[in-house]
Amino acid sequence: MINIPSTFRIAFRALKVNKMRSALTMLGIIIGVGAVIAMLAVGTGASKKIADQISSMGSNLIMILPGATTAGGVRMGAGTQPTLTMGDAEAIQKECLAVSDVAPVLSGVAQVVFGHQNWSTGVVGTTQSMLIVRNWQLAAGKSFTEQDVKSATKVCLLGQSVVDNLFGDMNPVGQFIRIKNVPFIVIGILTPKGQSAQGQDQDDTILIPVTTAQKKLFGTSFPGMVRTIMVKAKSTEDLAPAEKQITELLKQRHHIGPKQDNDFTVRNLTQIMQTAEQSTKVMTILLGAIASVSLLVGGIGIMNIMLVSVTERTREIGIRMAIGAKIWDIRLQFIIEALTLSLIGGVAGIIFGISGSELISTLAGWTTIISPLSILLAFGFSGMVGIFFGFYPAYKASLLDPIDALRYE
């Protein structure tokens, strides 16, 4: 019967005798485990950041852009021909069953003034539905109403970046600002959203009623014109039906024949963002796989040292077998030594990986997220490496002939 406690004592005693060699052998495992944890933390942090950006944009989003102009045979690209109207937005809301909310948009850049401060920012003319479509909450104040849109009221909601640059620590609600020399009263402040996936500051914006933008700020090429229409589908499953319904409806409203090109473009923003998120997940797996190579290198180091140990302790093995040690006693001794090196290296590697992740986050400014799963994965893999690469030296030691082993010098 295998004496497990005795085998453990012998294995630990052998490791203590060669402390420096054991420490250097563990170094490969420490670096490998630390690298896996740090790389997975960087990849998971990037995925989380993209997921937050998707959430900040709004869920189940569809954007409708106007058509393209053609001059002298040259097509100018989407958005250069004004073809969308408030009527289109209203029709989509009423007739497309897969659509939850619709927000028409007429936007532009304008200089905004408050007291002695001024700031150039994006001004978005839209309806109260924009807050629902973009999942945007109010930090203070209230939103404009349907009556404000009908009356083209000069009210506005400020993004946090505009508040910081114009008002500082002052409460802007109830204050008057001037947008292109037109006075507006601030009725609300939007909650911060941070950067978009394209790196744009989503908080550097002002929302006003779309009719106010049409009549008093930007003007229009024809009555009711808008530059884009943002649509929120009822669910993720409704995205494809919503796209189809919107396309068919706008073709009918714009009198577009079967063989004619559409004068609008329908884009599913959620799918675009999810594709970016999926790419980040693939990159996380690749980073983890690359870092795992160092674990394999550490395992090879363990196997080399254990083979050297078998050679050095040939006489010891012969004596043990001569006094009754079984084949699996010998095998288990060397497997335990290899496993101990791996597990101690794994624990040190976890500490190294967590510290490295925090250092990367501090120095590079990247978001890093250390998940318990990555720690368990790296630690478990280090143990498997110890068993796998420790088995051959253990197997070789157990096959030694006791008489030959006792004669070995």
Image: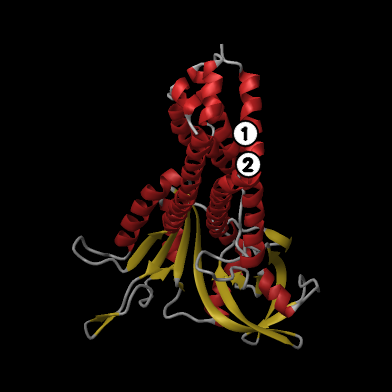
Q: Which residue is pictured at 72% across the width and 79% down the height?
A: 166
Q: Which residue is pictured at 37% across the width and 54% down the height?
A: 243
Q: CA distance from mark 2 to mark 1?
A: 7 Å
Q: Left or right of 275: which side holds 219?
A: right
Give the residue at mark 2.
18
- Between 13 and 231, the one nearer to me in the picture: 13
Query: Up-down: is 180 above or below 409?
Result: below
Residue 384 image position (x, y, % from top left): 50, 34
List the single residue furthest toward the top.
1
Observer able to see residue 141: no
Secondary element type, mark 1: helix
Label number found at residue 92: none
Which corner quadrant of the image does residue 221 belong to? bottom left
Query: Up-down: is 381 above or below 210?
Result: above
Which corner quadrant of the image does residue 276 belong to? bottom left
Q: Amino acid at mark 2?
A: Asn
Q: Left or right of 345: which side holds 225?
A: left
Q: Which residue is pictured at 51% across the width and 30% down the height?
A: 314
Asked if the residues shown at circle 2 and circle 1 are in contact, with their CB atoms under 8 angstroms apart, the answer is: yes
Residue 356 image position (x, y, % from top left): 63, 56
Residue 16 image position (x, y, % from top left): 67, 37
Dot 1 alpha-carbon crowd within 10 angstroms: few under 14, some 14 to 19, many 20 or more: some
Give the residue at mark 1.
14
Q: Quadrant of the N terminus?
A: top right
